[in-house]
Amino acid sequence: MAQSIAADAEAQQQASDSLHIHLSVGRIIPVLIALMLGMLLAALDQTVVGTAMPTVIKDLGGQNISWVYTAYLLASTVMVPIYGKLSDIYGRKIFFIGGMVIFLAGSALSGTSHDMTQLIIYRGVQGLGAGALMPIAQAIIGDIFPPAERGKWQGLFVAVFGLATIVGPLLGGYITDNWGWRWVFYVNMPVGAVALIAALITLPAAGRHAKHHIDYFGSAALVAWSVPLLLALSLGGVQYDWSSWQIITLFTVAAVMLVAFFVIELNVPEPIISPRLFKNRIFTTSMIAMFLLSAGMFGAILYLPYFVQDVLSKTATNSGVILTPMMLGFMVSSIVGGQLLSRTGRYKILALTGFAVATSGMFLLSQMDETTKDSELLRNMVITGLGIGVMMSLFTIVVQNAFPLKQIGEVTSTLSFFRAMGSTIGLAVLGSVLTNSFTSNVQANMPWELTPYLSAKDVANFGNASDQVKAKLFEALAHFGPAAPALAKQLQDAVKLSFANAISDVFLLGTGIMALAFVATLFLQEIPLRKVNQPATAAIGESVEALPAEYGEYSLGE
């Protein structure tokens, strides 16, 4: 088996080394535009759809609303490493375009939904396509530019997502109010058509012409452990208690299939995600840092709008407006950080600086309360955004630089996979902290006169409670006659204070997560960024100290 794996690896290396294709300067710009359009398509969809969901609920009904997001998340996350590996074998173009076609088909179908079940299924189809867009676009950038030049382009691509976060909710609100929620999905079609035509015309049709082994069993095992894990994390504490048999069963299945996946991947010639990748110290450190970054940053992105609206009592049309200062900082630092990386080639100091700034920003967020001034809120958001933006593209370049060119799709998609996993796990953990902290704070702060009639859990869940629970609250207040309005005001203030304290706890946990990422980055090994794009000859897991900084002439073209 070992000899077979070595022979197949050698054949693939020879095929990769023989790929000497040139992209002229005139072709590079159209290729970049095509890639950015594809990524913008997926990025805008997520933010636009979120704004339209209240209207969708009224039209289709509110049952299983969380599955509209969960189906997309499951499909896109699971497909990321599969697309990445297949693009290494058969070329990027077919899978980038194929993913875009599937995504557009899912968009068109979502707009025709007549009930929530149909919308959930069609959103899953969208996710199947979206899983190809981000990692393959980043891999194509890796094919075109050597690591020393990728920073200025990868930073620009990351800024696209910051822009989508700002523009998407505004666009979604306008479309929903003026055209109807179905056009939130239909609007993808003209944008997607332009992106698709641009990709068909400009992207190079380069592929590997060698015998390959498709990792069918590994792909199946990947789905078999990641889907139950994502389901457990998405539904736990929301639809089911963490201690329920449903969640415990999902975690158990995920653990068993993860072990099976690990065994399979060690014994196949071309694994989807090779465990041997983790022998590379740069890869392992980057995965840990990106996982923690994604887990921590979503505390700021998800809960800041709630803090601004419910604690500071500020009004905003949507979360995109509230997050604008943070996203502007995010965009600026991603672009500037990319330029600095390309000019200096020093990525460790950039990563450490980014985590230090992000940790400081998260700590400042954790110190906010109902008395926080607008200037303080603005400062804290900008600092956090500046710290996060630097690192979103940096680790992609770091891991691409540490491996042969023939593995760019695999390592890029694996990084994206861990980023998605970090986001999901972070949301689950931070959500649990918020719920538990809010409930305990309500217990301590609510008027003692109401405790015989109401539990802290009833009060904490009032916003999402059933009519029966709301009736229970009004009935409790009715016992106090003329004093009821004053008591209701005390209860309202107690809930506001409790929510502020709970969100502060979330930001404080985010601070700890960012600090852990900073510590992990201290162990990041720094090697020179390659200045040309010749594939390295190191095997998976080979010490990167043995790799030279430059590998000779290599270019990608048509």
Image (cartoon, grey):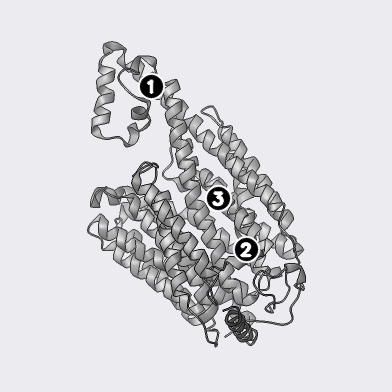
Q: Which mark is residue 327?
A: 3
Q: How many marks?
A: 3
Give the mark, 2 or 3, whose residue is nearer the N terminus.
2
Which residue lies under the disc numbered 2?
A: 278
Q: Is residue 69 visible?
A: yes
Residue 139 in the image, given as x and y percentages of width and height? 57, 71
In this view, 388 is above or below 102: above
Compute the Cα span from label 3 to label 1. Answer: 35 Å
Question: 266 above or below 296?
Answer: below
Q: CA distance from mark 1 to mark 2?
A: 52 Å
Q: Which callout, 1 or 2, points to the residue nearer the camera? A: 2
Tags 1 and 2 touching, CB below 8 Å: no
Residue drawn at x 38%, y 30% is 460
Q: Amino acid at mark 2?
A: Phe
Whether residue 36 is visible, yes or no, is no
User: Viewer-proximal residue, 479 or 244?
Assistant: 244
Q: Identify the image quadrant of the C terminus.
A: bottom right
Q: Disc 3 or disc 1, which is closer to the eye? A: 1
Q: Can you give x and y, in whole percent of width and height, for residue 294 in the image? A: 55, 52
The circle drawn on residue 491 is 1
Element marked by disc 2: helix
